[in-house]
Image (cartoon, grey):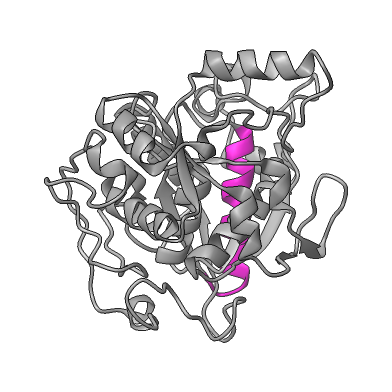
Amino acid sequence: MSVRHTRFPSPFAGDGRERSEGPGEGYLSSARVVKNPHPARTSQGSVRAALSHKGRGIAPTSPRFPMVQPVFRFAPSPNGYLHLGHAYSALINHDMARARGGRLLLRIEDIDQARCRPEFEAAIFEDLAWLGVRWDAEVRRQSEHLAFYRQALARLEAQNLIYPSFESRAEISRLIAEREAEKPWPRDPDGTPLYPGAAKRLSRAERENRIAAGEQFALRLDMERALERAFALDWAETGAGPNGEAGTVPAAPRAWGDVVLARRDMPTSYHLSVVVDDALQGVTHVVRGNDLFWSTSVHRLLQMLLGLPAPVYHHHRLILDSDGKKLSKSTQATGLRELRARGVSPSEIRQRVGLE
């Protein structure tokens, strides 16, 4: 199977091409520019034609993509070798796409260049081909489309919905410890303490001066301000959440606090990039592990703020180890490469994950 670069039309203002002069206006304009050796090109397509006008985003006739061919995606990160959990998710996406006469896309989520390596990406292609998973379009690599994430950030900044925070991780830990000395500090659904700082109270001039001076920063979503713009949010769930949640699920983004959407040295976060990419690729069905179930609340909020359509979501069970914990890429016993080397067949993989 050949692996090529993909080009998608943009739902955002501008053509999305990477340019050497930097990301343009906004907090990231004075930050380090990550140059892209493979510029993304855009074309006049259905997504771009759906723009109501510059800066408004997609204006779908329905958030649930009626009357279109279903589009699924498998989106691994090349920061380690695939294991049984990845195999399960890839196979479910593949099987659901085929059963519905849909398409399966492969996206490489390689924003974290410090951890992602070419050999891991090559192994992803090998493992999927061995499993019999076939994708229907060119591979999309997030690192080749950074301009789209900056455009999304610029739109949020234009709405006064993001702000830079300057505390280090150590400083944040200290602030949390001080607050927890008085009472328990709230945590997000993943168990991470909410942001305790006061950076949103800094003046615009002070923020810009600190950025220009080279301070490290994280761009955060002002959750309270964002929720002032949000109507009742929910999503269509055809799988099940950790407690069996299904059907129409109310979104609860406030539980995540002021989430990070980008950093000075990383122009996007998982939450932002996954929302942008799903819209750019026309994904209609997001099928993933239920450890990401409540992250959908943040994704629905970002979709609303950016004017992007909402896919149907299907969260599946996780494949756990003998101790009942989520599998890790460092666990060789469940790595697909190791299992293949021991003579395990693709059919046996299906049996091990409960698909046969």
Residue at the extreme left: 20
Give the camera-side residue of 31 and 303: 31
Left or right: 49, with 94 as reference point? left
Decide: is 114 above or below 305.
above
In terms of image quadrants, where is residue 85? top right
Left or right: 167, with 255 as reference point? left
Decide: is 97 above or below 269.
below
Magenta-drawn stretch contains 274: no
x and y percentages locating residue 256 in the rendered image: 67, 42
**Which residue is rendered at x = 33% and y = 77% of the image?**
48
Most common secondary structure along the magenta stretch = helix
**Which residue is rendered at x = 38% and y = 80% of the image?**
51
Give the camera-side residue of 24 and 123: 24
**Which residue is rendered at x = 32% and y = 38% of the image?**
208
Left or right: 296, with 71 as reference point? right
In terms of image quadrants, where is residue 240? bottom right
x and y percentages locating residue 118 in the rendered image: 30, 30
* Magenta extent: 84-102
The reply to whether residue 151 is visible in this rendering is: yes
**Which residue is rendered at x = 79% and y = 62% of the image?**
249
x and y percentages locating residue 254 in the rendered image: 71, 48
